[in-house]
Image (cartoon, helix red, strand yellow):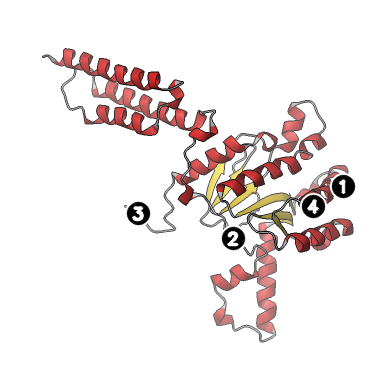
Amino acid sequence: MNSSIVSQHFFISLKSSLDLQCWKSSSPSSISMGEFKEIHDKLQILKLPLTMSDRGLSKISCSLSLQTEKLRYDNDDNDDLELHEELIPKHIALIMDGNRRWAKAKGLEVYEGHKLIIPKLKEICDISSKLGIQVITAFAFSTENWKRSKEEVDFLMQLFEEFFNEFLRFGVRVSVIGCKSNLPMTLQKCIALTEETTKGNKGLHLVIALNYGGYYDILQATKSIVNKAMNGLLDVENINKNLFDQELESKCPNPDLLIRTGGEQRVSNFLLWQLAYTEFYFTNTLFPDFGEKDLKKAILNFQQRHRRFGGHTY
């Protein structure tokens, strides 16, 4: 049988295999990863002198790979995002970006976008609890956000009071990192009450970064260590990474995964020390639109990475 006929028969077989998998499913997008891998492997192991060039075969192989990725990430059915329970990140850092742009795109005042922070974060906490995530650290207000207009800052301070009143009865443990002394006294009282009331809650721990910045956190930790050393409470030789970790405001294990919504690809002075070996995931989805499907996509992406921490796995 000449190479042209072999080529023709092979690709007819390939097409039939694809058609069969689609027929078995309710839609082509439900073809499993294993089925696509099997078809992809058929292309890879073919070693015949086909009239189609290697470049042509490469294009088809790449096309199948791209289709596989598309099915993996674009499937509308959340149940088809096969997350591995043992690889669920324990701690997710979250930059909730895009609220203002979401409102402006809809012809609304920016405040309308900010108002969605409370219900959206509740939704994410619910999903995270079900997935087994232990900690979420959410960036609510940075040390640089004071540069915004007084009207917007005042609105956000009032919104944060409502936020803590809501989470007072939500069932998760809530704590705050950041310089609280610069916040309005009424907000400080709300924070103290919520932290005290929820400290015994089991399950998800929600950490709110409020008037927080990475520079601030590192500086306050440094000042605390220097003060202890000057007062004879600490030997300089004993200053190390573990000690510095203990002086930072975040007392949780460092984040496994950072998610930033809204399309920007920077950390914006968030958890600078703690993110040293965190995996980053950036999405164009604006925070008010970020839901269960988006969170699962981020986690699936995280689970496909190889975390080597300076070593290697090959």
| Callout 1–callout 4 Cβ contact below 8 Å | no
| Callout 2–callout 1 Cβ contact below 8 Å | no
Foreground of the two, 66 or 59: 66
The numbered disc on residue 164 is: 4
Label 3 vs 4, first from the N-terminus: 4
Density class for disc 3 (Cα within 10 Å; few <14, some 14-19, many ≥20) is: few
**Which amino acid type is marked by label 3?**
Thr
Density class for disc 4 (Cα within 10 Å; few <14, some 14-19, many ≥20) is: many
Secondary-structure class at tag 3: loop
Answer with the quarter of the image where residue 252 lies. bottom right
Foreground of the two, 290 or 157: 290
Label 4 vs 2, first from the N-terminus: 4
Label 2 vs 1, first from the N-terminus: 1
- Could you say where residue 177 lies in the image, as x and y percent from the top left? 71, 60
For the image, the number of numbered tags is 4
The numbered disc on residue 273 is: 2
Instruction: Determine whether, in the image, residue 246 is placed left or right of residue 58.
Output: right
The numbered disc on residue 313 is: 3
**Which amino acid type is marked by label 4?**
Phe
Q: Mark 3, mark 2: which one is toward the viewer?
A: 3
From mark 3 to mark 4, how far is it between C-alphas? Answer: 44 Å
The numbered disc on residue 154 is: 1
**Which amino acid type is marked by label 1?**
Asp
| Callout 3–callout 1 Cβ contact below 8 Å | no
Q: Mark 3, mark 4: which one is toward the viewer?
A: 4
